[in-house]
Amino acid sequence: MSSLRTEGLTKSFGGVLAVDGVTVELRDGAINGLIGPNGSGKTTFFNIVTGMIRPDAGRVLYRDREITRHAPHRIAHAGIGRTFQLCRVFPRLTVLENMLVAVRRTRLRELMAGLRDAGETERARHWLRRMGIEHLEEAEARDLSYGQQKLLELAAVLMAEPDLVLLDEPAGGVNPALIDRITGLVRDLNAEGRTFLVVEHNMDMVMGMCDHVIVFDRGAPIAEGPPSAVREDPRVLEAYLGV
Amino acid sequence: MRTVSRGLPLLAGALAIAYPWLVPNYYLVYAGALTVMYAAMSTSWNLLGGFTGYVSLGHSAFFGLGAYGTGLLVVRLDVPWLVALPVSALLVTLFAAGVGIAAVRVRGASFVIVSIALVSMMNLVVQGWRSLTGGSTGLQVPSPFPGLHRGQTHLVFFYLFLVLLGVALLAWWQISRSRFGAGLRAIREDEDKAESLGVPTAAYKVAAFALSALFVALAGGLYALWFGSLDPIFVFSILIGSSMVLMSLLGGVRHLLGPLLGALIVAPAGEYFLIALGETQIHLTATGLVLVLVVLFMPEGILARFARRRAGPSIPDESADQRLQGVSS
């Protein structure tokens, strides 16, 4: 069973065809990479899969169930979590509150339960510890550095217990030590059974971390396969280098 | 310190209860009841505005509907006021939920415009439906306490509004401590991000909108019973909705007691300006000046100015990275 599959996914903005009939299938249990030049449709693809944008045509299937046009929160409940290209946290909430926003169920009784439910708080602290930012739990998110916010964003996504995690440029704007740390975390989380789809411009990170790489150009996939094969693919070289 | 912080609300509550017996005349009891009514309404408004950041200028629609609903049930159907009040408020809440489904689909300035349109439409409907509402001549509602003189009626309604305020504060406090409240605050901070974390933002916003309308409708119903005369121009006035916003902004929308504090300043100030400057619109200018000053010098409200930040920007930027390096080494 495929984790995520799209069929003929198409989206245009005005006259610009951002995603052009994309049919792809992620490797279940793998770290999938999605690369391509700027404007190749990677983030639009992310936004369609997570329900932020409605496609003009095509289908999105997650674990063989159609989720096309579902509201983003329903897609999150189905088990798909995501981060954003520009790191997004809730700036005026504390780090711990940021973690406790994630909702897995929407029963009224649970929603009106105290925010500081002991079990949920302990789960939040577990993820904060894994990110190395548990000492900041009472700080407001806006007071964290960008790198710390990146870690918090990932921790909050994991709080919702997704099976598939979509990371949009996890290495963007962070220092090399943190890139190594994020890479290690993704590998560990993948080893625990989570599937990843990573959009990233840092080729060292993608080639070193991903099991399977899909390359987009002008809104459509032009190549896919193991990193070593993709790296040598002439279509990829042409898309990136114009040679 | 903890004893002091626990004792202060008790002291404030005791002072509020004792207020009518401490002031020298019934006019001040009336002014107190008016202030507590506005405090209850702005606290209710803050269930939506404070938590989600959706600024409604049209909450007077729910005030007016609550007032007319209660009044019509009493006058046209001879329903006892104790039944008419909650029934009217519940009907308004259901109406608000229906309106909310459409209204909260738009954000920012568009939502403000929608909320203004709502109150204008309600005003036109009530004025136009003369056979039921009395139209622009208004509706006379008999006093629920005919044996009491006017001053004593002010006293009774002071306490009724005080109970409503207490319930509204309790609701706000309970929500602020819940996961539902965390979801609402997340909507205020970043709605798309909240949605991506599994928060059903549309349902949350509609729930907050309806709950907020409930207490405002109850205030409207009490107002109808208190004043006994409903003028559609006044009860569906944008000014009432603006007052709720002004009071909340002044005190601080992110704080439980912010709207209450705002009401304690704006409502008595309004009464003072009315007496000092006469029954012209100029007293509104004075109130507007207060708002301008607050926005200039305390944009997040008075309480935010004095509230303690849980952690300031003193967190070293490198701390996480240093720790990470420590972990990896």
Image (cartoon, rainbow, N blue to C red):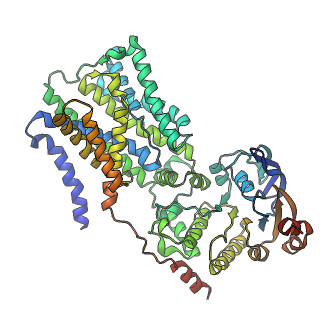
Q: In the picture, which quadrant includes the C terminus of chain A? A: bottom right
**Residue A30 showing in the rendered view:** no
**In this picture, is B89 found above or below B304?**
above
Q: In the picture, which quadrant includes the N terminus of chain A? A: bottom right
Report the residue that reaches farthest toward the bottom: B329
**Residue B57 showing in the rendered view:** yes
Left or right: A76, with A121 as reference point: right
Taking the spot 24% from the left edge, 25% from the top edge, the residue there is B227
Indicate the position of residue A201 as horizontal and vertical percent values.
Answer: 74, 69
Indicate the position of residue A219 as horizontal and vertical percent values.
Answer: 81, 55
Taking the spot 43% from the left edge, 21% from the top edge, the residue there is B124
* Tally of numbered discs: 0
**In this picture, is A204 found above or below A242?**
below
**In this picture, is A182 found above or below B154?**
below
Indicate the position of residue B70 as horizontal and vertical percent values.
Answer: 34, 24
Left or right: A168, with B251 as reference point: right
Indicate the position of residue A66 as horizontal and vertical percent values.
Answer: 76, 47
Quarter residue B167 falls in:
top left
Residue B191 versus residue A236: which sits nearer the camera?
A: A236
Report the residue that reaches farthest toward the top: B131
Report the residue that reaches farthest toward the left: B24
Quarter residue A185 falls in:
bottom right
Left or right: A218, with B194 as reference point: right
Report the residue that reaches farthest toward the right: A234
